[in-house]
Structure formats: C-alpha cells, structure tokens
C-alpha cells in the first residue's frame, strides 16, 4: 500500500528532500528490543556521501526517535524516527522547475501529482529518503542479528570492474562490516574509485551490480502464491532508487543452464539438510530452504549528470536542453549497499513476525 | 497477503494438483465487463502443453464460473472460476513421497507445512495452479484491451538460442497473438524446439528468458515508496514458478553503462512527451512515463528431470538417489509466456483500479 | 478489503443466491488442523430454516471441499469450500426486478453496480451467502475449541420477549450447544416462536437482540489503534445482514453509569488477575483482559415482508407499490445466532494467528 | 493493520502521552487539497479541555507539518503531522506504575507488551493520541466539505440528560459548528455541565451517548462482505477510547420493531430516490442509499476517578487499593464529539478514494 511496506512489521516513509523533515514510522516491532542509537548512526554513516566520489552536500543525519522507545527498548507501539533536513539550497532548483531531468522522476511525478509535487531536489523521490529507511532498519537489524540472521552486500561490479563473489560467507560478511567501500577484494576498491572519479570528471555517472548474502534465515519462510521470498524481497528492492534488475541465486545465468546443472542436490550434513551448490539462492518454490539467500541488484547509473541533456519543458511543452548545476553523485552504488541491506532486513523482519508472531523478534 | 495478490483487484488462488479442483476468486473487478469465455479458453490453450515438447499429460481445462458473472457480464462481486482436476495419476507420487526433488518445493513445503502438505504432483506448488491464474486474467485482459492496453511476451532466449527483440512494437504484438510458439523470428522456433527435444532425449530440461512489452499504460501509474511499478510487477512475476530474475528496460546492462548513455532524453512528439530510447522500460522513479513497459524474466530450467539425482529422504534423513519417472516438461518457457502476460494484466488492472476507481475498468 | 476479511486468516466469500455456487476461500489456516465435516454440517444445520417459523425453501447445504485439505487435515494452503445452489426459483424475481424492496440492498446495489448486479433473490447480498461463512468457520471452530476457546450466542430479546442473560457461563454455553432454538430459559422459546408466527400470519417480521459470550481468549489480544478487539469484532459483526447495533460489556447502559460503578475492579484469583464484574466485556483499551468477551448485536426485523409496501421503480423512476410473494423468513434472529458465532470465531482465529504465528492454531 | 487505518487514505498514529511527540502520517490523500492550518487548529481546540469541566492540564497543540504539503497544498505524498508533547509531569505516574487502574489499559498493555510499554499517563493508549487523529482529519475535512459532505456530532445523552435528536439537519449541523458544548438544545448544556461538575466534586465521572449525522455521501458506497459502511465506520469508532457501543439508524430500537414499521419506504423526490424515514441510518445492505448517515456511540464514563478503587499490583500480584491523584477528566463525552467527527471523516475519505480513485478528493 503506497508508502508503507510490510504486513506485520510495517514501515511508512514520509518526507521531501527540502521539507522540514524526513522520517519513518515502524509499526509492529516486538516489544523489548534493545535500541542501539549508535548502531543506527553507524548504518546512516555508511549511506552518507564520503570522499571525493560523492556529492559535496553534507548530510549529517541527526535522527530523533519521537515515539515507541522507552528506557532504551522498543515498547511494541509505533516508532517514529525523524531526521530534520538542513543544508538545503532550494534556489538551486527553482530555475529548472519545469525541465524534466531525463530518467528522473520529475516528469512522472508531474503526471501523477499534477504539478502539486514538491519538486525541489527530487522531493519525495529523492535518494535522501533512503536515510529514513536506513534509520528504520537500524531498529530491526540488531534484533535479527540476535536471532542469528546476518545480511551483507558488496559491489559485485561497477563500471565494468568485477569484485570476486562470496566464498567463505561468514568471513566475507565479517570483513564487509568494516569496509568503507564495500568490496571483498580490496584491490578493486581503488580501480572502482578511479572509475567513479573519471566519470565525475566528464560530468558523467556510473552504475553497477550489488550482491547480497543473508545467512541464518530458517527454512520454511515464504508463501507459495504470491508472497514468495523472491516476491517480497524484489518488491522492496525495486523500491530502492536506481534498482532496475533483481536476480536470485544464479539468476539470469540459470536461463542458459540445463536442469541437470541448475538443480541443487539435497544432502545431509549431520542432522541438517543442505544443498550442494546454491543456484537457487536459498529459495525453492518461493520458500527458504535454510541455505544462504543470495541475490543481485542491477543499479543504473545516477540519472543526474553534469553534461547537457536533451529534454522537454513540462510547462511550455517544448523541446529544450538541460544543463544541471546541482550537486550530485557520479555513483551511488557504494552508498546503496547499506540501503539494500536495510530493505532486506525490514522484509525479513516482516515475514518472520508473520510466521512466528508479534513477540518473537524481541525474545532472546 | 499469502495466496492473494492485489489491493484493488485481488486474486486468490486455491487448489492442489491432485485435489478436486483448482481455481481463483477475483474480487474488485468493475461491474459491466463483458466476459468472453472463448477468450479465456484461448488463453488457457496457450498455457496447455502441446506437441512433443511438453508433458504427455492432457490438461483440458474446462472451467466453471461459479459466481460474479450475470448475463454475460461481471456483476462487480467476486468471481470464482474453477477448474476441476482430471487425469491425475496419484500413485505415481506415493513411492517417492519423502524424496525431496532437487530445486523443487518438496523440501521447503515440508519445512513450512510440517508434512501436512498434499505432496502429490507438487500439490499447491504445482505449475498447474497457473491455469487458474490464467483463467482469472482472462476476465481482465479484454477489459484492458478495450482501454487500449496491450501485453505480449516472447521467448527472448532459450537454451542459448536468441530471438530478436521487439522492434515495431504494434506489429510484433499482433503477430505474437497468433504464434503457437511465441517467438518474433519464426526461424528460431525450430531451433528452440530441437533444443528442447534434445534435452528431453537426455532426460534433461532447458530454461530461457521471456521478454514482455506493454503498450497503452497511462503515465503517472505507480507509487514512489514502495509500490513502484517495478515492485508491483516483480512481486507478481517472481510468484510465477521458475522465474529467478526480473529486469526492466535495459536492466542488468544498465549497470555497465554510463549515465549519459543510459538516460532516456525526453522529447515532444506533437502534444505528447516521449523518450528517445527506452532504457528505463517505461518507468522512472517507479512511475510509468507513458512509454511501453519492457521487462525480461529469467526462467530456470524445469527442476524435474529424467536423470537420477542425488537427494535426501526427508523421513529417514539419509542421502539417497532420486530416479523420477513421472510425466514432466523438458521446458516450460514457451508455456510460461502466457502466464507472464496474465500476471502482468492482473497487476495492471489492480493498479489502474486503485488509481481511477472501482468502475473505471468497466467503462467504455 | 472488499469481500475478504482477516489479515492472517483471511476469508473471501463468493456467490449469488441464484448462481451456480456460493462458497468461501479460507487462507492462512495453520497446517494440521483436523477437519470435521460432520461439525461443519452441524453448524450449517443450525443456520438452516426449520419448523414453521422460517422460509419454506429447503436449503440443504451439501458442501464440497475443493482444496487445502488432505487426509483429513488442513494443509496450510487455501481451502475452498463450495456449496452448489439448488431449489432456486428465479422466475419469482424477474417480475419485480426494478422494484426496490424497502430496507433491502436492491437500490443500493443498483447504485453501486449500475444494474449489472444479479438481482435474483438478493444476489450476492442474500442471507444465503452466510452459509458459506458458516462453512468456513466450521474449519476453524474445532481448532479454537482445542485451544480452550468457546463461543456461544443466545437470543437475548425477540419481539419484546426477554431471555435471561448469561449467569453460569460454562453451563450456559454447554446447554446452548444442544438447543435448536438458542435461548437460555427454555420457557421463553415458545413465547418467541409464537411471536414469530403471529408476525408471519400478518405478513410481517420481527427482530431481536443476540448476546454472545466467548471464554478462554488469552489476555493481551488486540491493538490500541485501530485494530482494537471491539473494532475487529464489530467490523465482522456489522457485515452480518440485519445487524444494526453492536455493544460490548454493559454497552449503551455504560453511558448512564458513573465511573465508580462502571469500572471493573481488578482482583487476584489465585495466580490469575480477574475483574469483579465485567462491564467492559473482557476488553480494556481495546485489548483482551482475560475475562469472557461479552457483546450484543441488534438485529433489525427481516426487511422482506408480505404486506404491500410503498417503493419506487428504479427503471421508470416512479413511485409504486411492492407486493412481495417470494418465500421469506418472518424472523432470522434465531438463525443468525450461529452466524454471529462464526464471524466471531473467524475474527479471533485471525487475531490469534497474527499474535502467535501461522502454526499456532494447529498445534496441540 | 495495527496502528494504521484505511486502505486508500491511510492514517498511522504514533506517540505516547509523555514521549517527545505524538503524531500521524496520512498517506494516500489526493494532491492539490488546500491545507488550512487554521481549520486544523480549530478542530484541535474543540478537542482540548476547557472550563472547569475538564482536566487542568493545558494541552496546547502546536502542530508541525513535516512533509507532504507544499505551497499550501497537499502534494499527494505522505503527510506527517506532529505535535510535540509539553507540560508532562511524569513523576505523577511512577509511584503507581504497577497498580492497574480499573477499566484502563494498564493491565492489558502489560499483558500485551510484557512490561516494556511506556506506562506514563496511559502511554500510547492515552486519549491524548486522539489529538494526532484530529489533526490528521483536519487535512481531510475541508476536502470533504468541498465535495458537499458534512459531518456533525452532538451529545445525545449525558448523565441521564437528553438532548433532542436532529430535526432540520442542515440547520442543526450549522449551529453545532459554533457550539463550544456540542448540544442542539442549548437549554440542556447547563444541566449537563452541572452534572459533570457534580460528578467531579464526588471524584467520579460520567458517560454519555454521541449522535452523528453525515450528509452528502453519494449512494453506492460500501461493500457487501465485509467492508460494509457500518463495518468500516464501527471499526474506526470503536478505536476511539471509551466507545463501547455503536448503532446505526434506529439501532437497538429496531430489535423491537416489526418489519412493517422498521422499513424505510423508497420514494421519488423529483429525480432523486429518497426514503421516507431513516431507520436504516442511510445504509442498506452495507451500502449508502444517499440519505444522511445517522449513528450513535455509547461512551463509557472516564475510568480514571478520584475515589479509591480496588485493584491489583501487577508486579507483586497482590490485591491493593488505588488512590488516583493525577489530573483527569470527569467527562470526555463533549471532547470526544470532534474525535468522532474526525474518524468518520477519515473513514469516508478512505472509502471515497477507493471508489473514485486517488485524485477525486482533490478535484474541484
């Protein structure tokens, strides 16, 4: 439903890039979950632009928890987490109000909201809104971890440069926790950064592929029709700006395999059923099989670029040329990694709460 | 919510492969829509196995409309459409009851339903349930067409063989209507069929990629967070068995482009805003821009194969080998094309009804 | 959402009085619940007209379970339960097609469905549809009872004649199980029946008040805003045809009490917290307190009566007089008691499943 | 779903009586609706305690609109409206933390949230949260009025004193707009006030009955099963603290009528179909018939009273006596009138948006 995701743990996002605040209301979280404000801040800092490769706009994200937390723990009632906006230069945007930035939401927002939308800085469509999403997930992430569920995302590919895929999952996930630039092979970090800087220099932008692993999800989660794990996750993932493709397990490569190679044979590992191989990404028939979840998101290059672009004036209905001068990121792939982690966490918290009841996530 | 999809036009699926009936309840359809039983039958026949390349099981799908249709039109109340099961050989399945077919839902269903699931022929997870989905969509498809919305899917790739992509969309969509084997370039049909037969011969299966176009969707449909058009469609698409990847527009290829190439410039075409190029697949910021929707689904090869496979016995908890003898499809990609069309139709009907109200789809 | 009730255990109703079938799809029921077809039939027989006080139409309700039940237990997948229609005399209705029966749904259905509604016998608005609701609840009721939750409804008032209220709850609930005419004081049964027959003789109808008790509901069920137990139950209860008022505990009488009398003091009863008095009907702040739930429903008299009534012709838009000749009930209060039990059962099953998870209701 | 109401226009409440803020997020409102902050403030002032008959706590409600409004109009994106808390004396509550106030939510909250709830001043259960609800409705009310829909509530009964019922609806609704104490017959205002003061003097509280009328709702709104207008409204109404009974039209009085008297004959009034009489409260078969909606809510007396009350200590699990010293209202009936108006407005906005689409409410 619109700006809410989740049936059992529900997150509602509000806010515009240049309005008073952005924020999220998280409803349905179990009572008694420890709220770690430092962990939330840490997540937010992973999303924040840094170094020379991101926008110069300094988005300090000092959040306020308005409700639903008492004496350091969730109460079980809705948590409103709010991030006041600051450092907004609205005049940057007035001049180009009617010029639809190509592949941005300006034109579609105008079609949907008939011109009443807050156009400044992307308004409600701004990537900035993901800060609220990250803050919301920061309430959930420690509870999932306490249940043995870990989530990690790295840049699998960026501007044509490949990181290696996950191998020793637990070790890889641990090391990603400390990486400012989320790659497994540290050697490629510099190449990717150079690639981003080269694009920046040319007033251009680059995209990439993010790869996510989740361990510790119990088998038997998901619904056959229509709330498969793939359906639920992709619903959330495609809401992250710039995601234009999602694949699970071997994904598109499965299309070219034969069944005999694509299938993951079941095997006993002690008392536990595992699969040899994980082409299915931990999901069969839409339901988790106890193996790690594995998926990849294709991230399009940031649509805002410094080069002049052909477009239309939405008011005068004429062809024109747009020359963007606003601050923008030549690449958001590295910043989006934590957002992917966060929507994954929220989706799993929702599904687990549905399956095991409203108190489960708070029980230790 | 579980076995229901849609907030405004909602479809609930029921049934098991070897139970009395499968079916769907469609709620929220506008009153006054002409119900074309022949069109429903035609859709169902596109899903039905045919020729030597599909399972020998003859699934005639004689559906019964139990409610919600009066004097040939929808009444606006829930429509139950039911397909009685026949030609089920349940004894085929009893012998292998506890052997988890690799990459099938047997094991995950067992984890979820604790052994109470109807295991025969895949039960509620069977691809057969998509017949009910197709029948449900058959109620909606003509109403969408009356509104100028057309949907068509072709096999973009199968066993490594490529069909050309869409070029002249309207012409391509028209010709696909009459193709028994849904490819644009008829020359590749035989190659693909040969490829399927070769796999069959070896007791194996093949996968592929389906590509879908939708024209006539008004601009301004979709929600920023979280019910983007991509989110809504992927939610439905990933519920179709065997779909393991979904990409919109240029999809994963966008990850390797620069923004200057990836962006679709807006242009005036007479009074209308269009884009030059459609790398975005008709969707910006999660909202339709009036251009054709374009997306591709990766279909994994059918997990049921004739070759012996390593697996576990879920009851004795031991490694074992599964030798399947049941009827099965060496490929379901060509049959799945219509299912993709159908979940697309249902998703769009749902979103359009939410936007324009409950009567819109029935108005002419 | 429209014709579905329940977020965790969801029931979707379909069917028209004179269509092929009516039925329900129940989704979200835990796997492993014993399905007792005799219990369902017994519930249905309590709803069925009987004796001289109900319509002459013989509604044998031979239901078919189309899905979701395997080897006598729920599988956890959607259960479609279907009741084919028979003994329908559609010609009874054609003559008066455009005459809006006063206080019936004919006119409002016409406004909503623009004339496409199946008008015969009330169509989708017919009280007959409650048979599907009762059958659906028949799947749930035994599971609730196995959890120690009992539900019973008696006629508190009918045509001005009063039954005593509940006193010894457990004994009262037990004796109601065997009563064909659901009153606690058997002496009033004859008076009420006479009252109904007198109304019938005069071509008129009578209403009444149903009173319901529920024991065994754990404390802590319900949500503060907006899914209070009263909200959830009243939502379901007001969907039962003829219900025009719902009150909990002392209900409207509370409006005339002072707080000092209205309040239910808490007391320890051994280890358990109870209340002295139950003016709150087992609910404080929208949440169950462990005491019995108590509520009453006001049932309006059946709108269909034998006397001539002033009305309008919806087609010619003229005042006219309606003389009904169809079969109808002079009273449905006694038949509605089981329907109230059933929507109560479904609502509680839904809320309990949300609270304790998807498997809880099937666990013993 | 939990703390959200509405499927198309959805309101999510957050906040605790003594936390940083309370507030609401309103999602799904059409773009372009004029936001009248003065109108919101006026509604809030009607809810605020006043004179000697209410709590001494001064709740000035300076709200902040954090999002979703731009240049004085709704944008179509979620509106967060926030009311910071002030004047909270938390120490008032610590001493009685474990004493369950009779007929309050203390005990049930403790059962539900396991002691993690913010107990101060009723926490999330506090009547104060209705200020957020009122503010949210203040965004919607002018849009409804622009569509010709008017809502008014008066005190039908209070402490045994009766106000007259509605007679000339339009005139009555107009005069209620200006009444500080919402009664139709100004003569009874003083009697009711005296009655409240008398109860206050004795450390007691009084309840009452609120009666609401809504004009201008188009015919054909509502769903047969299960989202009847009565179901939707009662769902919202029973979420208002202290409501323990809801009846539509003649309500419980219908139970004692015969059909021939209860039925509302249809009549032509010019081109329009009306009913003679309105025992049905404007709703037949769960759907509006175009006549005014009429309903009454039974309000229990405020549970907080000054007299000593028997209760239990939830921690020591012993019987004890509670002597309340906190500020409290001897009566909230007059203050609740506007809250009833507001949940009615929100419910109708939700249903109308579902029926006519997302833009309708903003169109003029």
Image: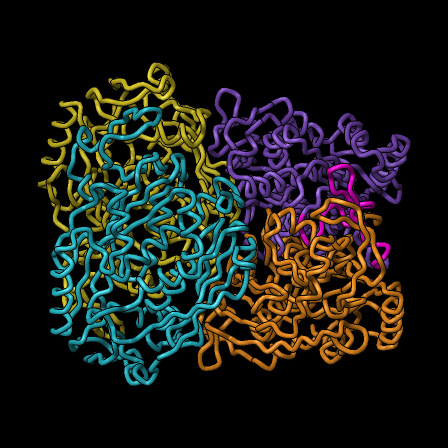
Chain colours: A cyan, B yellow, C purple, D orange
Q: Residue at x 14, y 69 (%)?
A: A197
Residue B57 location (% of width, % of height): 29, 23
Magenta residues, start to end: C259-287
Total number of numbered discs in the rendering: 0
Q: Toward which corner of the image does residue C182 lie, by quadrant? A: top right
Q: Quadrant of residue C137?
A: top right
Q: Is residue D261 above or below residue D200?
A: above
Observer-nearest of D262 and C274: C274
Q: Is residue A98 above or below residue D202?
A: below
Where is residue B324? Give x, y as percent: 26, 19
Query: Which residue does the image show at 59% across and 58% down from the upper left?
Result: D221
Looking at the image, is D327 positioned above or below residue D2? Answer: below
Quarter containing the C terminus of chain C: top right
Foreground of the two, D173 or D160: D160
Q: For this rendering, which residue is in front, A37 or A264?
A: A37
Q: Is residue D321 left or right of residue B196?
A: right
Residue B344 included in the magenta stretch of the image: no
Judge whether C46 appears above or below D160 on screen: above
Tell me: B61 left or right of B332.
Answer: right
Is C281 part of what is drawn in magenta? Answer: yes
Residue B64, visible in the rendered structure: yes
Residue found 38% across the figure and 48% down from its top: B346
State the image coordinates of residue C337 (x, y, percent, origin top left).
74, 37
- Residue D201, horizontal then vertical, whole percent: 88, 69
Is residue B113 shown left or right of residue B206? right
From the viewer's side, name the closer residue of C112 and D340. D340
User: Is residue C66 at all visible to an observer of this figure?
Assistant: no
């Amino acid at each position: 439903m619109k700006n809410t995701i989740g049936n059992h743990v529900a997150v509602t996002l509000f806010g515009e890039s240049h309005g008073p605040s952005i924020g999220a209301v998280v409803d349905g979280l179990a009572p008694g979950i420890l709220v770690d404000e430092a962990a939330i801040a840490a997540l937010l800092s992973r999303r924040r632009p840094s170094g020379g490769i991101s926008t110069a706009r300094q988005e300090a994200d000092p959040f306020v928890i308005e409700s639903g937390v008492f004496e350091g723990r969730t109460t079980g009632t809705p948590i409103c987490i709010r991030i006041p906006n600051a450092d907004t230069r609205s005049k940057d945007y007035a001049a180009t109000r009617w010029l639809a930035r190509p592949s941005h939401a300006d034109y579609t927002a105008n079609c949907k909201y008939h011109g009443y939308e807050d156009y400044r800085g992307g308004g409600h469509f701004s990537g900035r809104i993901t800060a609220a999403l990250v803050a919301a997930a920061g309430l959930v992430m420690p509870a999932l971890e306490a249940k043995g569920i870990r989530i990690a995302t790295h840049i699998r590919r960026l501007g044509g440069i490949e990181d290696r895929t996950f191998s020793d999952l637990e070790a890889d996930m641990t090391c990603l926790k400390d990486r400012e630039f989320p790659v497994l092979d540290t050697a490629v970090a510099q190449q990717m950064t150079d690639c981003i800087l080269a694009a920046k220099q040319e007033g251009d932008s680059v995209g990439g592929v993010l790869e996510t692993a989740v361990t510790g999800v119990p088998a038997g989660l998901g619904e056959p029709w229509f709330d498969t794990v793939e359906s639920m996750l992709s619903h959330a993932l495609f809401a992250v700006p710039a995601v234009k493709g999602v694949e699970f397990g071997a994904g598109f490569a499965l299309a070219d395999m034969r069944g005999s190679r694509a299938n993951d044979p079941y095997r006993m590992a002690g008392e536990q059923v595992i699969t040899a191989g994980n082409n299915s990404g931990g999901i069969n028939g839409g339901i988790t099989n106890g193996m790690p979840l594995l998926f990849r998101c294709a991230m399009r290059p940031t649509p805002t670029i410094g080069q002049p672009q052909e477009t239309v004036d939405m008011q005068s209905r004429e062809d024109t040329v747009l020359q963007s001068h606003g601050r923008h990121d030549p690449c958001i792939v590295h910043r989006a990694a934590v957002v992917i982690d966060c929507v994954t966490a929220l989706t799993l918290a929702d599904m687990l709460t549905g399956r095991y009841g409203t108190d489960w996530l708070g029980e230790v």
